[in-house]
């Protein structure tokens, strides 16, 4: 099993066990590039969150091995969403790890301090790992996420070394889910709809153009629709 697949499977198992999630949809994703399915879209539900969505795309012909997890909290919750992308390509390994804010951090200082400040030493340690470098994403895309986002290209050795960072981010998020957080004066559901619409917009994230070329517009819309809903 590849490093990205192993990390994704282990993280999803921890999520499922901690939150009592069960798979409710498991859809094969196909491509003209292969007679066999090139990936899976899975939806898991149960426990105190809305759902978790996983998307795996593995195409050896183009050196792609990509695994995404997005765990969404409820529409009226201020607890951030958890996300992990773990990827290997022909040139490098990559990772995207974050807790997606549910409120504007600049005007909700108590929320920032409770939810995100504990991640600071974890992020600083991660960036000091040998073999890590920032991924090439622009400020427009970064604006949809949090300042504690870890988005990077890494050597295989550094990818393994970041296991602890992933575990610690997830442990912190699960603690927030379990104990809850202080009230936030914001239109949580409305902001979340707008943020997710931007976050998964092909005009913002060019990965959707590549996914469309790989699996076609109908299946790409299916994946995006599950992330938006």
Image: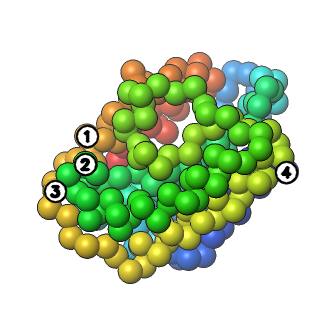
Q: With respect to residue 17, does 3 lie above or below? A: above
Residue 154 lies, in percent from the top left, at: 73, 38
Q: How many residues crowd around disc 2 within 10 Å: few (fewer than 14), some, or many (20 or more)? A: few
Could you tell me if residue 92 is visible in this image?
yes
Q: Is 104 on the left or on the right of 24, as rendered?
A: left
Residue at 42% across, 79% down? 178
Q: Are marks 1 and 4 in contact (CB under 8 Å)?
A: no
Quadrant in which residue 114 is drawn: bottom left
Q: Which residue is mark 2?
A: 106
Q: With respect to residue 179, does 31 lie above or below? A: above
> What's the CA distance linking mark 1 and mark 4?
37 Å
Q: How many residues crowd around disc 4 within 10 Å: few (fewer than 14), some, or many (20 or more)? A: few
> What's the CA distance linking mark 3 and mark 2?
13 Å
> What's the CA distance linking mark 3 and mark 1?
13 Å
Residue at 43% across, 35% down? 142
Could you tell me if residue 208 is visible in this image?
no
Q: Is 201 on the left or on the right of 154, as rendered?
A: left
Q: Which residue is mark 3?
A: 186
């Amino acid at each position: 099993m590849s490093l990205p697949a192993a990390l994704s499977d282990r993280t999803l198992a921890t999520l499922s066990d901690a939150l009592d999630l069960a798979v409710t949809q498991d859809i094969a994703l196909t491509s003209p590039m292969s007679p066999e399915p090139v990936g899976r879209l899975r939806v898991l539900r149960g426990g105190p969150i809305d759902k978790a969505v996983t998307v795996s795309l593995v195409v050896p012909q183009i050196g792609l091995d990509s695994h995404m997890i997005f765990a969404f909290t409820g529409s009226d919750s201020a607890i951030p969403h958890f996300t992990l992308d773990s990827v290997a390509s022909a040139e490098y390994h990559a990772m995207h790890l974050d807790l997606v804010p549910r409120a504007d951090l600049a005007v909700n200082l108590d929320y920032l301090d409770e939810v995100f400040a504990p991640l600071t030493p974890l992020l600083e340690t991660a960036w000091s790992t040998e073999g890590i470098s920032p991924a090439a994403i622009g400020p427009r895309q970064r604006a949809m996420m949090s300042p504690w986002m870890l988005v990077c290209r890494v050597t295989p050795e550094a990818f393994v070394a970041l296991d602890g960072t992933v575990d610690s981010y997830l442990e912190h998020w699960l603690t927030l889910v379990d104990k809850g957080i202080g009230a936030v004066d914001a239109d949580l559901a409305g902001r979340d709809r707008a943020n997710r619409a931007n976050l998964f917009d092909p005009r913002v994230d060019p990965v959707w153009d590549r996914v469309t070329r790989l699996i076609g517009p109908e299946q790409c819309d299916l994946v995006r629709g599950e992330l938006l809903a």
